[in-house]
């Protein structure tokens, strides 16, 4: 079952933000921590939800970045400036990206583009939301754990969707917070999105497949519970294979990365014109995925 309305998932675990851009709050016996950074325009909504749900903002001592794409780090500058002692955790590669002026400019540009697309740009007039290079934090690695008191948050490196991607697993809740390292539950689909390296994406899914999952907390379009959560990783493995086969078939026919990406994008947007990410941004993502798959095909003997 998929749940797309923000609120309490269970005691100590919250879905916050909005249907299309989700962040999660873990409340431990010692501290609370936000997992994933969502879109920048969420800030006024989060502040409202803290009040509505009686969430103690002052208990939030950490924020875990699962990967550095613009739609997953948007709230971080505001909350780091609001709470200077807030600890920001990310992978080593994520910090390399987030310290790059070019990356910061892209984050700000794309964040505003999406806010304009959905009519939420006024948040920028009310709050200081832009990334700047002063944001820094702590590096976490495969096998690390973050202790929130009676909650352990296990860190798993899952590159492929991005080169910097992490997943988090909370044994107490049997909750997997994998961001876009697993399928994106859009409408009735699961979108396999191995943006930076499709092969590494598939390998990361294999790392996650044996976890015992009762809650699968996605960064887009809510969370899954029950059987759908339990089979999310295996379902994504199957969808990723099907997607890769489709790309390979089109590339064999066209012999062109550009033509293959364009055909895949046209097919997707024919039925999904309301998708959060603008077509011009997603086309670049598809081009990158196709390029990797095409290069892997060309390397075969």
Image: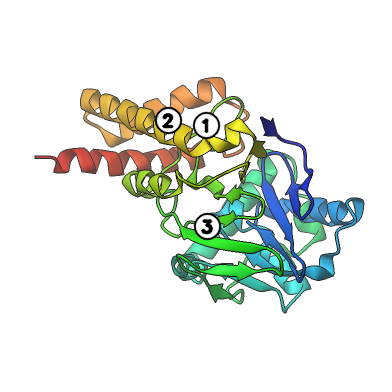
Left or right: 298 in relation to 148: left
Give the distance between the C-alpha atoms of the residues marked 1 and 3, in whole angstroms.
19 Å
Q: Of the numbered discs in the image, which one, if any, rests on residue 222?
A: none
Q: Nearer the viewer, residue 30 or 194?
A: 30
- Circle 2: is it few (<14), some (14-19), or many (20+) Cα within 10 Å? some
Q: Which residue is mark 1?
A: 190
Q: What residue is rendered at 78% in x and 53% in y?
A: 123
Disc on the earlier residue, 1 or 2: 1
Left or right: 137 in relation to 254: right
Q: Which image quadrant for residue 293?
A: top left
Q: Which residue is mark 3?
A: 67
Residues tagged 2 and 3 counted as in contact (Cβ below 8 A)? no
Residues tagged 1 and 3 counted as in contact (Cβ below 8 A)? no
Q: Nearer the viewer, residue 140 or 301?
A: 140
Q: What residue is rendered at 14% in x and 40% in y?
A: 300
Disc on the earlier residue, 1 or 3: 3
Q: Nearer the viewer, residue 200 or 224?
A: 224
Place of residue 43 in the rendered image (x, y in percent of width and height, measured from the top left): 77, 56
Q: Which image quadrant for residue 36?
A: bottom right
| Image quadrant containing the N terminus | top right
Circle 3: element type: loop
Q: Which residue is mark 2?
A: 239
The vertical placement of 134 against 187, above or below, is below
Q: Name the image colouring.
A: rainbow
Place of residue 133 in the rendered image (x, y in percent of width and height, measured from the top left): 57, 74
Place of residue 274 in the rendered image (x, y in percent of width and height, measured from the top left): 63, 29
| Image quadrant containing the C terminus | top left
Disc on the earlier residue, 2 or 3: 3
């Amino acid at each position: 079952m998929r749940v797309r309305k923000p609120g309490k998932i269970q005691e100590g675990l919250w879905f916050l933000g909005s249907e299309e851009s989700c962040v999660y709050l873990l409340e431990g016996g010692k501290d609370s921590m936000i997992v994933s950074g969502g879109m920048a325009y969420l800030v006024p909504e989060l502040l409202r939800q803290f009040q509505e749900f009686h969430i103690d903002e002052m208990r939030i001592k950490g924020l875990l970045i699962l990967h550095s794409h613009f739609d997953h780090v948007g709230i971080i500058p505001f909350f780091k400036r609001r709470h200077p002692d807030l600890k920001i955790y990310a992978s080593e590669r994520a910090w390399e990206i987030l310290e790059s002026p070019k990356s910061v400019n892209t984050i700000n540009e794309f964040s505003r583009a999406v806010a304009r697309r959905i009519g939420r740009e006024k948040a920028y007039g009310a709050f200081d939301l832009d990334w700047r290079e002063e944001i820094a934090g702590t590096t976490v690695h495969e096998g690390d754990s973050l202790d929130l008191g009676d909650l352990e948050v296990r860190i798993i490196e899952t590159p492929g969707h991005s080169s910097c991607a992490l997943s988090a697993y909370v044994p107490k809740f049997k909750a997997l917070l994998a961001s876009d390292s697993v399928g994106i539950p859009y409408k009735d689909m699961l979108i396999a999105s191995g943006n930076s390296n499709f092969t590494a994406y598939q390998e990361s899914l294999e790392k996650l497949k044996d976890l015992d999952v009762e809650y699968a907390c996605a960064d887009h379009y809510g969370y899954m519970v029950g059987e759908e959560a339990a089979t999310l990783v295996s379902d994504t493995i199957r969808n990723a294979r099907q997607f890769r086969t489709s790309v390979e078939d089109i590339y064999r026919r066209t012999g062109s990365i550009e033509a293959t990406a364009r055909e895949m994008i046209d097919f997707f947007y024919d039925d999904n014109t309301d998708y959060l990410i603008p077509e011009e941004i997603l086309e670049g993502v598809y081009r990158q995925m196709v390029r990797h798959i095409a290069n892997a095909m060309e390397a075969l003997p």
